[in-house]
Image: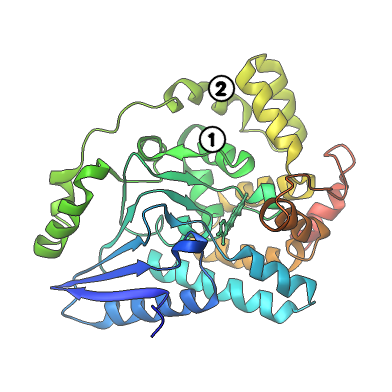
Amino acid sequence: MEEPTLIARREGGIAHLTLNRPRALNALDGPLIAALTEAARRAAEDPAIRAVVLEGAGGRAFSAGGDVRAIRSLVLAGDRAGVHRFFAAEYALNRLIAEFPKPWISLIGGVCMGGGCGVSVHGSHRVVTESALIAMPETAIALFPDVGMTYVLPRLPDRLGIWLGLTGARLAGAEAVEAGLATHFVPAGRLDALRQALFAEGPEAIARFAAPAPQGRLAALRPSIARCFGHATPAAILAALAAEGTEWAREQAAILRRASPFSVAVSLEAMRRGAGLTLPECLAMELRLTATVCFHPDFAEGVRAVLVDKDNAPRWTPPSLEALDPAAVAAAFGG
Ligand code: QUE
């Protein structure tokens, strides 16, 4: 028997779910999303289950995201219904987790990006270790921060979420707590003991294992991020970064200029709209956006450059923010 891609075990009153595609960094493909949805439904209904504990197998990743290579194949085959099906199922799972009637506890070590954030951040408890690397890197592949992150990111303090969603900046575990994406920091060496305590006692155990999050570089950057990422357009953000006159600001501008111009503009607009929407409204907006964004030439090109050919040399259409037609961005939102 081949190992299942979702391992679901019962440990006393806890449903212990393990994402088990370690060679793909536990990326969420269609079958894994379906299995996780089914396991979540059963755990919600089962009166003997008091909480869910979710983690990733293999030690390197919680989850690297959605299976964007497979989505690219659907796009290249012109399978619009298939693309819609994938994202509709993923976003429905994100909503199920947000509305989950019991504690949904994610234990996050290693990479947690994109879709990995979507199956953790909406839950009640997000425990990170010092090995956690949390990011929304979608603009690098000409997608946008989805999985309900258009709801979450604009609500983080000091425009941190806008910065994360546009640049794909990676937060270490303690920084994720500071940003509000994670709720507890637990040293990796105590994770096995925490897991056993969760099985024995339930969610109350977390407080005993949590340690003060060590200070990262985020605290020092917050004022600059707040000054630069509150603007309404990519051009205004680039102007604010130029006015900072620091090495950090020059790096952020370079990152924004390397990403897909179309995707940067759509991502900023989606997060700005998301600030005034509910989570279900954000997920509905995201689902509508996938129909345009995934079929824009930049998406297949971005996945090719970053994940298929790995040349990291995408050729964007148009190639620069200056050449981007604002009407094309507005059209992605239905005008
Ligand atoms: C941006 C992304 C993703 C990414 C890299 C980016 C993403 C994603 C993966 C990924 C990584 C390793 C795997 C895999 C997928 O990388 O969403 O299957 O083995 O899933 O720059 O949005």
Q: Nearer the viewer, residue 256 or 266?
A: 256
Q: CA distance from mark 1 to mark 2?
A: 10 Å
Local crowd size for mark 2, using a 10 Å CA cut-off: few (<14), some (14–19), many (≥20): some
Query: Does residue 237 appear in this view?
Result: no
Query: Does residue 233 appear in this view?
Result: yes
Please name the residue that numbered disc 1 is placed on.
Answer: 159
Rendered image quadrant of residue 104: bottom left
Tell me if 157 is positioned left or right of 106 in this view.
right
Q: Earlier in the sequence, mark 1 or mark 2?
A: 1
Give the residue at x 41% y 48%.
Answer: 110
Local crowd size for mark 1, using a 10 Å CA cut-off: few (<14), some (14–19), many (≥20): many
Q: Nearer the viewer, residue 58 or 102?
A: 58
Give the residue at x 38% y 78%.
Answer: 3
Q: Is residue 50 above or below residue 153?
A: below
Rendered image quadrant of residue 289: bottom right
Residue at the top extreme, as displayed: 245
Residue 88 x %, y %: 58, 74
Q: Amino acid at mark 1?
A: Arg
Cβ–Cβ under 8 Å for marks 1 and 2: no
Residue 160 x %, y %: 51, 36
Q: Nearer the viewer, residue 286 or 3?
A: 3
Quadrant occupied by the N terminus: bottom left
